[in-house]
Amino acid sequence: MSNKDNDEKMTRGEAGRKGGEVAHEKGTAHEFSSEEAREAGHKGGKAAHEKGTAHEFSSEEAREAGRKGGEVAHEKGTAHEFSSEEAREAGRKGGEVAHEKGTAHEFSSEEAREAGRKGGEAAHHKE
């Protein structure tokens, strides 16, 4: 079987990957700006969802991806710094969703008392 026969049986994705590898080896590959990469990812994700082939993240996978993204953003100095009001609002929304889904942590009276004590201490120690 010739290479031509093998190439004809290659999927478009495989052919694109192979072409990209060759371009990188030759040093002729296009280097995407972060905006171009974001746009390409957006288009690819949209197409995958329309085709029904997009990866569906489990809660654990999504949490891990978010954790890693947050770490990188903090290392690069690009992470969003939440104001206390933004953090409070995010926590409130997360709590509402967790309660609606039935996944919220149910605090014992001791845990609630301790959380209240710590919150009170933090509020008193603010500058």
Image (cartoon, grey):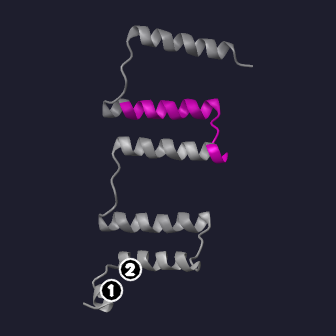
The magenta-colored residue range is 75-98
Residue at 36% across, 19% down: 106
Q: Is residue 97 magenta?
A: yes
Camera-side residue of 121 and 6: 6
| Placement of 39 over or under 70, stated as above or below | below
Residue at 31% across, 81% down: 10
Residue at 62% across, 36% down: 82
Q: Does the magenta stretch include residue 54?
A: no
Residue farthest to the left, as pictured: 1
The residue carrying pointer 1 sits among few (fewer than 14), some (14 to 19) or many (20 or more) residues within 10 Å by Cα, namely few
Disc 1 marks which residue? 7
Dividing the image into 4 quarters, which one contains the N terminus? bottom left
Look at the numbered discs 2 and 1 and tell me whether their residues touch, using CB distance below 8 Å: yes
Residue 23 position within the rendered picture, expressed as x and y whole percent measured from the top left:
52, 79
**Kind of residue indicated by mark 1:** Asp
Residue farthest to the right, as pictured: 127
| Placement of 89 over or under 111, stated as above or below | below
Separation of disc 2 and disc 1 at Cα?
A: 8 Å
Residue 105 position within the rendered picture, expressed as x and y whole percent measured from the top left:
37, 23
Q: What element carries label 1?
A: helix
Disc 2 marks which residue? 15
Residue at 50% across, 44% down: 68
